[in-house]
Amino acid sequence: MPKTKVYVARQEELLPRIGYSVVCGERKIAVFRLSDGRIKALENISPYRQGPLAEGTVSGEYVYCPLYDWKISLLDGQVQEPDHGTVATFETLLEDGKVYVWI
């Protein structure tokens, strides 16, 4: 299935290490701007009890689920041990100050 480029925010709307939530069709997406400026996007649902990851605490390249403190990589969506699971990630694009997610 071909992916679609979806506009989600202007770059300045994304504060470093603060999650930004957006709904794209039927998907809930959490978008994060890391301290070094990289922009990462993943499903806005923790694999354990569906906590909203956009409300989590960001440390380095990880977000901590706000409900159960699961540590999840913003790079590949892998839940870190001792917990387990994966969160879907999405490719992002910054173009003329606008942030897009490929869905």
Image: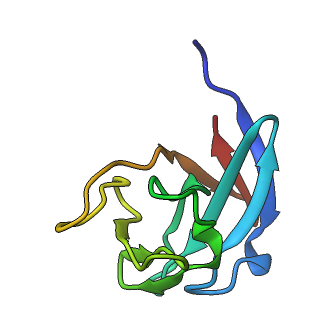
Which of the two residues, 99 or 27, is positioned nearer the viewer here? 27
Report the side of 27 relative to 48 (left or right): right
Q: Farthest residue toward the left?
A: 82
Q: Quadrant of residue 99?
A: bottom right
The residue under the point 34% across, 65% down is 73
The residue under the point 71% across, 36% down is 5
* Residue 21 against residue 28 in the figure, above or below: below
* Quarter occupied by the C terminus: top right
Q: Position of residue 33 (x, y in %)?
A: 57, 75
Q: Position of residue 72 (x, y in %)?
A: 36, 66
Which of the two residues, 74 or 33, is positioned nearer the viewer here? 74
* Residue 32 against residue 103 in the figure, above or below: below
* Residue 35 against residue 72 in the figure, above or below: below
* Residue 42 against residue 10 in the figure, above or below: above
Q: Position of residue 84 (x, y in %)?
A: 26, 55
Report the side of 9 relative to 52 (left or right): right
Q: Position of residue 65 (x, y in %)?
A: 48, 74
Q: Quadrant of residue 59?
A: bottom left
Which of the two residues, 95 or 59, is positioned nearer the viewer here? 59
Report the side of 6 relative to 74 (left or right): right
The residue under the point 37% across, 75% down is 62
The residue under the point 80% across, 50% down is 23
Q: Farthest residue toward the top?
A: 1
